[in-house]
Image (cartoon, grey):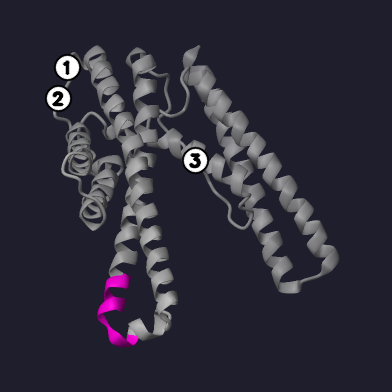
């Protein structure tokens, strides 16, 4: 009975996927023709057709997600496949991308979720870790922006020609310019510090909840899986960042260098480790 249900579900889901892809594909062709010919009546029709295509595809994607949620009995965020599935749907909904057709990636080996993956600790772990990744990456990007602006200004002040071109001539204007630049750099540094300070507790909670769930599922709180190891490295990097700022009083370019290095570490932890295809977290890759 379960096998028949899964086969019917996969058939229906495949139909929805193909229909959404074809709808967006024809909308893309419609807009291409509209760009080349530029007919006003045709343009008006194209806008309506694009809007209808977006709404229908978005609705069918929403239905498909609900069906997958009901069939697997868990919200579709357990690994990279359903997460990408949800991401594509969100992109189409919020940004209304009508010039490209997105064919969703669907697992061909879909099956009912095992009891170990139905734990609330797992859902908490995945959700909190995604929030921490988003916050840490955002804070690191601000630190990288600080380093870029700081480096450009340093080159400008050391180069007479560049200084004469970009810096105002009068004394009052120079003082105002310097004040504005310092204020801008301080804002970048402070915002980066606050966002990373927000993401670090989420990262800590995510690691702890993951270890609790791992003990329930695998009988061990920590098994030195590649994902776990890089999560620990990420935690240590940002712990060093916060320690140097809070205890040592570092700010500006010193702490920004640490945060920029943390940017690379976060991406390795989030996606880079999955490229290895090894460990307990390898189920999240497209293989």
Question: What is the secondary structure assignment of the residue under circle 1?
Answer: loop
Report the residue marked by disc 3.
87
Real-space Cα separation, disc 1 to disc 3, in angstroms: 32 Å
How would you rate the neighbour count of disc 1 (Cα within 10 Å): few for under 14, some for 14-19, many for 20 or more? few
Q: Examine the rendered structure and indicate whether residue 164 appears above or below residue 64.
A: below
- Sooner in the amino-acid sequence: mark 1 or mark 3: 3
Please rate how many residues cluster around mark 2, counting C-alpha atoms within 10 Å: few if below 14, some from 14 to 19, many from 20.
Answer: some
Query: Residue 143: image x %, image y %?
Result: 32, 54
Which residue is located at x 44 percent, y 35 percent?
A: 83
> Is residue 36 rendered to the left or right of residue 263?
right
Which label is found at residue 223? Answer: 2
Q: Which quadrant of the view contains residue 249?
A: top left
Q: Is residue 286 visible?
A: no
Asked if disc 2 and disc 1 are in contact, CB closer than 8 Å, the reply is: yes
Check if residue 258 falls in the magenta segment.
no
Magenta part of the chain:
152-161
The residue drawn where x is 75% and y is 73% is 37
Extreme residue in the left direction:
224
* Near-viewer residue (121 or 67): 121
Q: Mark 3, residues whose alpha carbon is within 10 Å: few (<14), some, or many (≥20)?
A: some
Give how far across and how far down residue 239 sits, in percent: 20, 37
Q: Secondary structure at mark 3?
A: helix
The residue sitting at the right extreme is 41
> Label 2 to label 1, Cα distance in Å?
7 Å
Horizontal side, residue 258 vs residue 192: left or right: left
Is 238 situated left or right of 185 in this image? left
Up the image or down, 254 lies above or below 121; here it is: below
């Amino acid at each position: 009975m379960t096998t028949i249900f899964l086969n019917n579900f996969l058939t229906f889901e495949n139909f929805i996927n193909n229909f959404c892809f074809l709808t967006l594909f024809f909308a893309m062709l419609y807009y291409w023709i509209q760009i080349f010919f530029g007919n006003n009546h045709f343009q008006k029709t194209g806008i309506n057709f694009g809007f209808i295509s977006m709404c229908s595809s978005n609705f069918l994607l929403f239905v498909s997600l609900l069906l997958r949620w009901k069939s697997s009995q868990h919200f579709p965020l357990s690994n990279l496949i359903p997460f990408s599935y949800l991401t594509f749907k969100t992109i189409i909904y919020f940004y209304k991308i009508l010039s490209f057709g997105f064919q969703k990636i669907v697992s061909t080996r879909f099956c009912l979720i095992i009891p170990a993956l139905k734990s609330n600790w797992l859902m908490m772990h995945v959700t909190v870790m995604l929030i921490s990744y988003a916050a840490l990456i955002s804070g690191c990007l601000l630190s990288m922006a600080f380093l870029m602006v700081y480096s450009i200004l340093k080159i400008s002040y050391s180069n007479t020609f560049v200084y004469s071109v970009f810096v105002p001539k009068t004394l009052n204007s120079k003082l105002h310019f310097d004040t504005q630049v310092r204020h801008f750099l301080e804002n970048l540094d402070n915002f980066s510090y606050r966002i990373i300070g927000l993401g670090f507790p989420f990262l800590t909670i995510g690691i702890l909840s993951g270890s609790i769930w791992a003990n329930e599922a695998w009988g061990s709180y920590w098994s030195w899986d590649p994902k776990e190891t890089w999560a620990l490295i990420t935690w240590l990097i940002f712990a060093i960042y916060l320690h140097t700022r809070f205890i040592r009083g570092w700010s500006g370019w010193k702490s920004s260098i640490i945060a920029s290095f943390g940017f690379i570490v976060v991406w390795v932890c989030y996606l880079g480790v999955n490229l290895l295809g090894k460990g307990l977290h390898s189920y999240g890759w497209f293989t």
